[in-house]
Amino acid sequence: MLNRPIPDSHYFRQRRAVWIGLALTIALDTAAQLCWKAAAAHAPESAGMLQILATTFRQPLFLVTVALFICMFFNWMAVLSKADLSYAQPITALGYVSVSVIAAIWFHEDIPVHRMAGIVMIISGVWFISGTSHRTVTGNAQSPSKAKRCEGQP
Amino acid sequence: MTGRVLGLLFVIVSVVLEACAQIFFKQAAEHDRGGMHPLALLRTVWRNQRIFAGIICFLLEAVLWTLALSHLPVSIAFPAGSLCFVIVALLSRIFFHEQVDAMRWIGIALILGGVTLVGV
């Protein structure tokens, strides 16, 4: 006999949906960051604050950035309806990894050792978080302070 | 005020705005889970002021973050910006009673360190 509840297929289906949503978040975020950066790069070096903003916001690529953010928003709401915020949000830090890897490939740069170490640290951090359950389940609706995690380690 | 102090101020405000936006979005997602069909979502968005509040936070944040990046090197802005993960974890514990256990804190700490190294 197991003395803890066995995670049912619903739990795993939900968990898979959460991870698909997170993968989509990271992909959209990466694309948006790269477009934003490209749009901002049009501003002259010596520009003042308002000038930087005005030049950036007028770039066609900035519209693409906005469209990507709107897609991200709907996807993110779907993720949050299924997962804890303290689970989903840190995992999106994988966006730093994909942005720096893609930027390095794009600009034909080598990734320096310390950045490589940072990438490894982010991935291991995400690995730790993925070891927890994606959603805190309240055992008793009357006492949310006694929130119990639904037991289901992968 | 020197550029660097101003830049840090921008970062701090944008971190707080980001955390607020995330809390608003999570509240909205919890409040009305009327299905995740895109049309149902669109209706939810229209009805829910929390989502508007969150979006306004995000827009302000985008402006401030852009300004912060023009005043600060990435090696300072990135680590300072990633403090957001800590604030969001604390707030989701307080507001949503999420169980943020040692595993999650270790993960968040590693991510903070990692983001710092990526930004250097």
Image (cartoon, coloured by chain):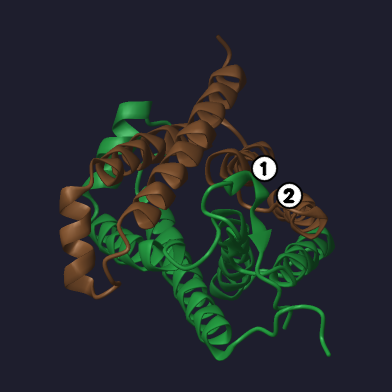
Q: Residue at x 76, y 56 (%)?
A: B114
Q: Amino acid at mark 2?
A: Leu
Q: Quadrant of the N terminus of chain A?
A: bottom right
Q: Earlier in the sequence, mark 1 or mark 2?
A: 1
Task: Give the residue number, with chain letter if any, for mark 2.
Answer: B112
- Camera-side residue of B56 and A143: A143
**Identity of the amino acid at label 1?**
Val
Q: Quadrant of the C terminus of chain A?
A: bottom right
Q: Position of residue B8 (x, y in %)?
A: 59, 25
Q: Residue at x 56, y 28 (%)?
A: B12
Residue at disc 1, secondary structure: helix
Q: Tell me whether circle 1 and circle 2 mark residues in contact (CB < 8 Å).
A: yes
Q: Quarter of the image holding residue A85? A: bottom right
Looking at the image, is B51 positioned above or below residue A25? above
Q: Is residue A19 left or right of residue A4?
A: left
What residue occupies the far top of the structure in this picture?
B1
Q: Return the chain for callout 2.
A: B
Q: Tell me the brown chain.
A: B
What is the chain letter for disc 1? B
Against B69, residue A67 (above or below) is below
Q: Position of residue A14 (x, y in %)?
A: 50, 80
Hue used for the chain lettered A: green
